[in-house]
Image (cartoon, grey):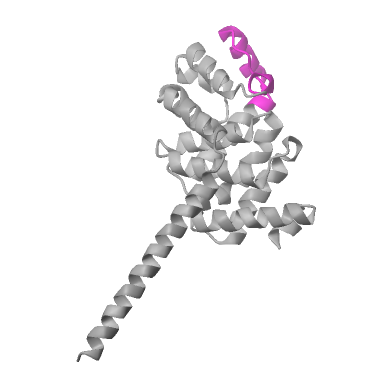
């Protein structure tokens, strides 16, 4: 129902989305409705780029693998940041990778998504102070700096230009909520952050692999329980 009500059109697309949602629910230990909402909110936000349910789900599972977050937490929060990220020109894989990278440092998923939304909002609507500071630093600032897969390059330039200075960063990102993820990226392990974004970009097949692992585990547990029940029945018969 959530797939249809959210505006996913075409029977084949709806059925494919439901199929992916079922696999995501199994692998992510959430209900199908929760998984579907995460996929549909992502697809709606990135409708112009033609994001598919498979692409969204695969990126989300890489985020779970690489960061300190869960599919359920991502599902609950992705809808608050995806529309802003799409508007800023950030690729979906970059957004999901950024969330994963920030949570890896121990920042909660909801705080990470709120911070990244604030960061991107600051680049969509650049304040006069931010524009002046960017000019002083010789830094391209605004959505043009991140569009077309340039998010990592922008962050690298930001790190070099500001040297992680909180005063300079505060002028560029006046919203205090944006400073958390920004500081984490520029003052943290930037190479690992870049690696995670590469992983989410090359995430094809992650949902299928995760679901297969869960199915194998469930099959193993079922066989083990069946064997234990047989032993119990035999023991009771011998009493």
Identify the image quadrant of the C terminus. bottom left
Task: Please identify the quarter of the rendering in which residue 219 is found.
Answer: bottom left
Q: Residue at x 61, y 55 (%)?
A: 21
Q: Residue at x 58, y 31 (%)?
A: 94
Query: What's the residue at 68%, 34% (across, down)?
Result: 86
Q: Is residue 31 visible?
A: yes
**Side of 3 where 57 appears, left or right:** left
Q: Relative to 37, does residue 154 appear above or below in the rendering?
A: above
Nearer to us in this view, 91 or 204: 204
Residue at 40% across, 59% down: 217
Instruction: Please indicate whether residue 111 sits to the left or right of residue 140 in the image.
Output: left
Q: Is residue 235 above or below residue 138?
A: below
Q: Which residues are magenta?
A: 123-147
Q: Is residue 233 above or below residue 143?
A: below
Count of marks placed on residues: 0
Q: Nearer the viewer, residue 150 or 144?
A: 150
The x and y percentages for residue 223 are: 37, 69
The x, y position of residue 237, in whole percent, is 25, 90
Please, which residue is most extreme toward the left here? 239
From the top left corner, tell me how far across and down residue 73 is, in percent: 51, 50
Check residue 98 for magenta coloring. Answer: no
Name the residue nearer the viewer: 132 or 228: 228
State the predominant SS element of the stretch in magenta: helix
Res. 149 image quadrant: top right
Indicate the position of residue 135 as horizontal and vertical percent values.
Answer: 62, 9
* Residue 108 in view (yes/no): no
């Amino acid at each position: 129902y959530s797939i249809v009500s959210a505006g996913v059109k075409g029977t084949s697309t709806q059925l494919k989305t439901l199929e992916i949602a079922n696999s995501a629910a199994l692998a992510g230990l959430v209900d199908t409705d929760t998984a579907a909402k995460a996929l549909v909110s992502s697809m709606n936000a990135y409708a112009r780029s033609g994001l598919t349910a498979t692409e969204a789900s695969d990126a989300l599972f890489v985020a779970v693998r690489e960061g300190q977050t869960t599919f359920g937490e991502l599902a609950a929060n992705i809808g608050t940041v995806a529309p802003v990220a799409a508007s800023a020109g950030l690729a979906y894989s970059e957004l999901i990778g950024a969330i994963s990278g920030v949570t890896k440092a121990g920042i909660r998923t909801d705080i990470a998504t709120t911070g990244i939304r604030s960061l991107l909002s600051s680049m969509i609507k650049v304040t006069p102070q931010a524009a002046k500071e960017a000019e002083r630093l010789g830094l391209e600032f605004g959505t043009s700096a991140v569009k077309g897969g340039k998010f990592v390059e922008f962050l690298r330039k930001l790190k070099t230009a500001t040297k992680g200075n909180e005063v300079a960063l505060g002028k560029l990102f006046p919203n205090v909520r944006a400073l958390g993820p920004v500081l984490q990226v520029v003052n943290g392990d930037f190479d690992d952050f870049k690696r995670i974004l590469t992983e989410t970009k090359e995430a094809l097949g992650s949902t299928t692999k995760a679901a297969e692992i869960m199915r194998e585990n469930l099959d193993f547990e079922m066989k083990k329980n069946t064997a234990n029940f047989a032993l119990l029945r035999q023991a009771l018969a011998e009493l």
